[in-house]
Image (cartoon, rainbow, N blue to C red):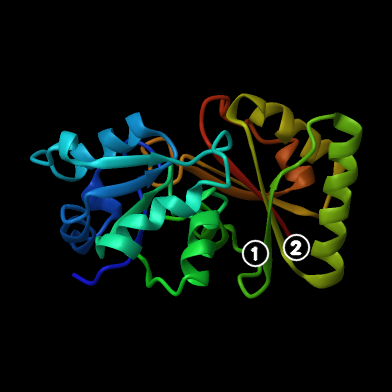
């Protein structure tokens, strides 16, 4: 196993490990002793899910989230630089460094010429594009839209213009408890012919992925999605 910074995907929910992660990932993970994680508790739970025999007390965790001082995160790579020991990055869900603070560490690793190895795993962003039926040649992830309704509608209109003028698929997310409000705003604000894909609980038992026009969504019975991570896509 080569000394490197390994980007370790996790499941997108309570999905079984063997459904979405290759056995190769297991062999890498069990040989790493230093992990950069968004949440230590959930990272420990994930590692035990990967391999029950892992001794958590032997591992070192470095927390990286929105509260972390960006001035110190370069030090998280010291095991690679000074001890020639591999470090793994574990996200809260899906793939590290994609809509994830791990990107900051990867940027530092690249600047220091540290080998970076992305492992295979589920990405809700990519999987939602795959299942939407929208343009997969040109798409953009926009993160969160504004919370206030007037600004949100303005942002939606701007994304809709990109869909129609550039044929570029537009992707965004929302905090689960605001999903229903987001759906209401989308279908009431966009052109009737604009297509909207709602992708929720990807790879999980509650998976829901449907593409309809804005006008068709008004006639659909939408399931309760207030507690499920969703991705929203606009296309034509």
Where is 171 relative to 130, above or below?
above
Q: Is residue 144 above or below residue 195?
A: above
Q: Quadrant of residue 132?
A: bottom right
Q: Secondary structure at mark 2?
A: loop
Residue at the disc numbered 1: 134
In the picture, the quarter occupied by the N terminus is: bottom left
Q: Residue at x 77, y 70 (%)?
A: 167
151 vs 81, nearest the viewer: 81
User: What label sits on residue 236 in the rendered view?
Assistant: 2
Percent x, y of residue 7: 38, 59
Q: Pinpoint residue 153: horizontal percent, then vertical percent.
A: 87, 40
Quadrant of res 107: bottom right
> Residue at point 54% right, 38% down?
68
Callouts 1 and 2 close, C-beta under 8 Å: yes
Query: At x 64% / y 64%, what residue is drawn?
Result: 134
**Quick one: 208 or 150, which is closer to the camera?**
150
At 46% across and 39% down in the image, what residue appears? 201
């Amino acid at each position: 196993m080569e000394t490197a910074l390994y980007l370790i995907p996790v499941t997108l929910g309570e999905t079984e490990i063997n459904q979405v992660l290759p056995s190769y990932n297991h062999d890498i993970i069990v040989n790493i002793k230093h992990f950069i994680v968004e949440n230590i508790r959930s990272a420990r739970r994930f590692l035990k899910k990967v391999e029950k025999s892992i001794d958590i007390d032997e591992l070192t965790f470095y927390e990286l989230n929105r509260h972390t001082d960006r001035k110190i995160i370069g030090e998280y790579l010291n095991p690679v630089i000074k001890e020639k020991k591999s470090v793994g990055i574990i996200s809260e869900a899906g793939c590290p460094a994609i809509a994830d603070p791990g990107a900051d560490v990867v940027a530092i690793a690249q600047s220091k010429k540290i080998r970076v190895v992305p492992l295979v795993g589920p990405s809700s962003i990519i999987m939602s594009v795959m299942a939407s039926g929208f343009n997969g040649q040109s798409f953009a992830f926009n993160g969160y839209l504004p919370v206030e309704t007037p600004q949100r509608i303005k942002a939606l209109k701007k994304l809709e213009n990109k869909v129609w003028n550039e044929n570029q698929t537009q992707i965004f997310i929302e905090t689960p408890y605001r999903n229903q409000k987001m759906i209401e705003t989308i279908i009431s604000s966009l052109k009737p012919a604009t297509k909207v894909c709602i992708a929720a609980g990807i790879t999980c038992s509650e998976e829901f992925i449907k593409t309809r026009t804005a006008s068709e969504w008004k006639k659909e019975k939408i399931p309760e999605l207030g507690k499920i991570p969703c991705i929203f896509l606009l296309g034509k």
